[in-house]
Amino acid sequence: MAYLAKETPDLIVSDVIMPDKSGCKVCAFVRAQQALVNTPVLLISGIVNDEVTKQAESCHADGVLKKPFQGTSLQGSRARAVGQAARCCRTLRQEY
């Protein structure tokens, strides 16, 4: 979180379950920062079920990836599409 307070990444990928915080807490932190509010956040989990999906939606994550995944799945059109859609949705929410 200290890194996110100083930097503006293009994409944030966070595990749902970590030893000291949850991916949802990271996502909530990102959404509360004006400089990061439009940054896409993807959560990763070994189990993607209704509960994990609801958690991701409740913290306004832009998607959930199932582990294990290849880093190449974050490249190219899929990651760009997620980022563009996330920014568009947040812009619309802010305007209306």
Image (cartoon, grey):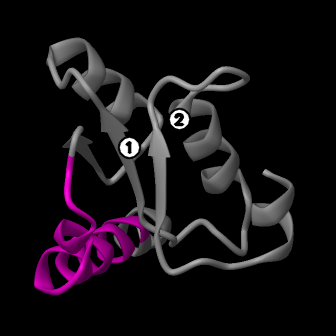
Seen from the viewer's position, the closer of residues 48 and 25 is 48
Q: Earlier in the sequence, mark 1 or mark 2?
A: 2
The quarter holding residue 37 reads bottom right
The residue at 74%/60% (across/down) is 33
Percent position of residue 7, x then y: 76, 77
Q: Which residue is mark 2?
A: 23
Seen from the viewer's position, the closer of residues 63 and 87 is 63
Amino acid at circle 1:
Leu
In the shown orientation, is residue 32 left or right of residue 74? right
**Does residue 92 lie above or below 59 as drawn?**
below
Percent position of residue 3, x then y: 80, 64
Amino acid at circle 2:
Gly
Please tell me whether mark 1 sits on a helix, a strand or a loop. Answer: strand
Mark number for residue 43? 1
In the shown orientation, is residue 71 left or right of residue 26? left
Percent position of residue 2, x then y: 86, 56
* Majority secondary structure in the magenta region: helix
Please tell me whether mark 2 sits on a helix, a strand or a loop. Answer: helix
The residue at 40%/62% (across/down) is 93
Q: How many marks?
A: 2
- Residue 58 lies in the magenta stretch: no
- Residue 84 lies in the magenta stretch: yes
**Does residue 77 lie above or below 55 as drawn?**
below
Q: In the picture, which quadrant includes the C terminus? A: bottom left
Seen from the viewer's position, the closer of residues 59 and 77 is 77
Q: Are marks 1 and 2 in contact (CB under 8 Å)?
A: yes
Mark number for residue 28? none
Read off the magenta span: 69-90
Count neighbours of disc 2 (C-alpha within 10 A) and say few if under 14, some if 14 to 19, many if 20 or more. Answer: many
The quarter holding residue 13 reads bottom left
In the shown orientation, is residue 58 left or right of residue 31? left
The residue at 25%/43% (across/down) is 64
